[in-house]
Amino acid sequence: MKWENTFLVFELAKGPKVICETLDTYGNDGWEVCSMLVVAGSQICCFLKRRTDVDEPKVDKEEEKLSKLWSNAKE
């Protein structure tokens, strides 16, 4: 497995809403928090990772067409 790593630093005084929104945004891009560290009692440093060796699943056009024909989901 191959991983890409990054980190984010948050000010505790700004509250949890900023932290949650930022982590949700990164999560939508495939990032996952792997650890957190409190720094000087006023900041949180979050370390994030995501896999870089994952291929997107190939979509079979015929299977997709049949699936749409047999589902009752409205698009």
Image (cartoon, rainbow, N blue to C red):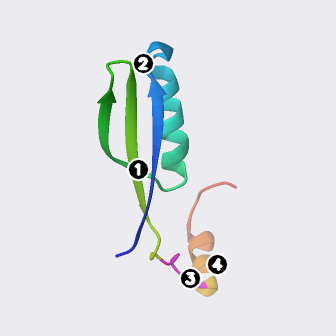
Position of the N terminus by quadrant: bottom left
In terms of secondary structure, where does tag 2 sit? Answer: helix
Residue 62, compared with residue 69, is above or below; it is: below
**Which amino acid is tagged 1?**
Leu
Residue 15, compared with residue 50, is above or below; it is: above
The mark that comes first in sequence, 1 or 4, is 1
**Which amino acid is tagged 4?**
Lys
Q: Are the two marked residues, 4 and 3, in contact with CB atoms closer than 8 angstroms?
A: yes
Circle 1 residue: 48
Q: Residues within 10 Å of mark 1 (few under 14, many from 20)?
A: many
Using residue 37 as the reference point, say whether residue 62 is left or right of it: right
In terms of secondary structure, where does tag 3 sit? Answer: helix
Circle 3 residue: 63
**Which amino acid is tagged 3?**
Glu
The mark that comes first in sequence, 2 or 4, is 2
Position of the C terminus by quadrant: bottom right
Q: Nearer the viewer, residue 25 or 46?
A: 46
In terms of secondary structure, where does tag 4 sit? Answer: helix
Q: Position of residue 70 (x, y in %)?
A: 56, 71
Look at discs 3 and 1 and give the one toward the viewer: 1
The mark that comes first in sequence, 3 or 1, is 1
